């Protein structure tokens, strides 16, 4: 119960007050909400490395992940969990960040395998990104090369417990300290790096924009950021189109 | 044409090229060492008159101490079922060679890959642009003088093996049982 105090509760006319004074109903409802949220998780079925091979046995009849309320989902906009299973090459990391930013909050990142922790057996490779939580806020690491389905299930149960008790809120960290994450991304991808997502605008929307959301790196981003343009659609063959 | 009848004929054909050295590595493997200038003639001869229509790979080896690149052209004949490996040596600097794209179309991909990984330029190849390492700005990474470990140490950070959150897990009976420093001694 003590962790529930840390969850910001926005009640009419009593913003930021003592949670105990807000009445029993608010707290019971929040507890119920967190419980339901932890028992209905869609994980994004975008598997990045060799650890993905442990997920089919975790999903199918022997370990049956669905009994925990976890199901694969194909699109990032409907998913809650982003699984990063295994080594992350720098080219893949760009796509992972694009995918992560498309997911709606609250969203959780799980790093599976040793490669996401410190590069694993590819620690000497020039192409493998080493520490995943420098570029994305990772909620949970499941280490091992590769972790067995039991370990994956244990990690998932730990994440469910963290969501229920309100500990798994690292996705807010991405908005609060966006400048830090963007700086690490720029160090790897170059100063011209940009995503189509307006993260600072989203941080304002969630009310999470803090002193570390903007900084020198976001200033650099704003110098060259091109706003997202709708794609022009036209019927006809490729030859008819004029550039 | 049976399998036995073509093999002596092939060796007779190969004798036409000067400075060639043929070694049988096995019943179906022939190693051919020759000068770089005569390789196109060899490939044309093998393709045109001996049925070696399949260039299965081009391999590059970096001999840094001898200042040379070695290129190996692997050719396969579906009729005789013999693999011919043609080895040539090139000076490492400036590292330029002729493309064999006009003889074997798949060579375009092998040459583009070798150009990207070793920095060896093939004249006459249709495309020498970026292939797999589309976002790579550093030196060609398969060259022996590219120190990958130094590059990694220079560009990446590491996280501690014994962070605070692991101590919680160790209190529950989990965590690392063998310390990394014990293993690497």
Image: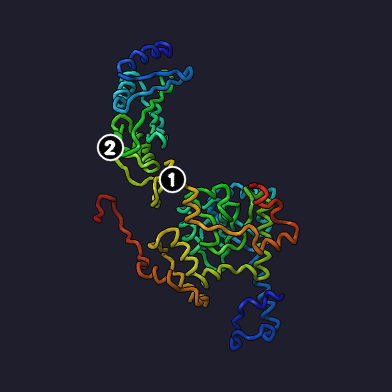
* Dot 2 or dot 1, earlier in sequence: 2
Label 1: which residue? B146
Label 2: which residue? B123
Which of the two residues, A177 or A109, is positioned nearer the viewer here? A177
Vertical comparison of B54 with B133: above or below = above
Asked which secondary structure carries label 2, the reply is strand
Residue A147 in picture, x, y percent from top left? 65, 50
Left or right? Give the position of A100 relative to A167. Answer: left
Disc ID at residue B157? none
Residue A176 in picture, x, y percent from top left? 52, 73
Q: Residue at x 65, y 65 (%)?
A: A38
Left or right? Give the position of B174 relative to A111. Answer: right
Q: Residue at x 56, y 57 (%)?
A: B158
Asked which secondary structure carries label 1, the reply is loop
Vertical comparison of A235 with A32: above or below = above
Residue A3 seen from this side: yes
């Amino acid at each position: 119960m003590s962790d529930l105090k840390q969850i910001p509760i926005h009640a009419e006319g009593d913003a930021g007050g003592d949670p105990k004074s807000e009445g029993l109903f608010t707290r019971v409802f929040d507890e119920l909400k967190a419980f339901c949220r932890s028992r209905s998780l869609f994980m994004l079925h975008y598997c990045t490395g060799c650890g993905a091979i442990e997920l089919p046995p975790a999903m199918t009849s022997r370990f049956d992940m669905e009994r925990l309320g976890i199901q694969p989902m194909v699109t990032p906009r409907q998913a809650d969990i982003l699984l990063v299973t295994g080594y992350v090459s720098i080219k893949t990391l760009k796509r992972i960040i694009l995918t992560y930013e498309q997911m709606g909050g609250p969203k959780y990142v799980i790093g599976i395998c040793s490669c996401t922790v410190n590069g694993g057996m590819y620690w000497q490779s020039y192409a493998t990104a080493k520490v995943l939580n420098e570029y994305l806020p990772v909620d949970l690491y499941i280490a091992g090369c590769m972790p067995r389905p039991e370990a994956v299930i244990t990690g998932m149960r730990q994440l469910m417990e963290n969501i229920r008790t309100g500990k798994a809120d690292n996705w807010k960290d991405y908005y609060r300290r966006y400048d830090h994450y963007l700086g690490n991304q720029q160090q790897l991808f170059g100063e011209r790096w940009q995503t189509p997502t307006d993260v600072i605008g989203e941080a304002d929307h969630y009310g999470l924009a803090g002193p570390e959301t903007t900084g020198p790196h976001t200033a650099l981003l704003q110098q060259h950021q091109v706003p997202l343009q709708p794609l022009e659609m036209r019927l006809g063959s490729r030859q008819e189109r004029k550039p | 044409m049976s399998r036995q009848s073509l093999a002596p004929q092939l060796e007779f054909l190969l004798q036409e090229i000067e400075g060639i050295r043929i070694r049988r590595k096995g019943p179906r493997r022939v190693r051919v060492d020759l000068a770089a200038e005569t390789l196109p003639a060899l490939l044309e001869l093998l393709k045109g008159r001996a049925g070696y229509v399949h260039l299965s790979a081009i391999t590059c080896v970096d001999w840094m101490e001898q200042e040379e690149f070695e290129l190996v052209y692997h050719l396969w004949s579906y009729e005789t079922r013999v693999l011919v490996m043609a080895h040539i040596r090139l000076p490492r600097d400036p590292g330029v060679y002729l493309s064999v794209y006009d003889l074997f179309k798949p060579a375009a991909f092998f040459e583009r890959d070798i150009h990207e990984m070793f920095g060896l330029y093939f004249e006459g190849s249709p495309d020498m642009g970026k292939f797999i390492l589309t976002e790579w700005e550093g030196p060609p990474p398969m060259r022996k003088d590219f120190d990958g470990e130094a590059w990694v140490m220079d560009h990446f950070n590491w996280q501690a093996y014994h962070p605070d959150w692991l101590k919680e897990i160790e209190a529950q009976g989990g965590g690392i049982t063998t310390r990394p420093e014990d293993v690497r001694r």
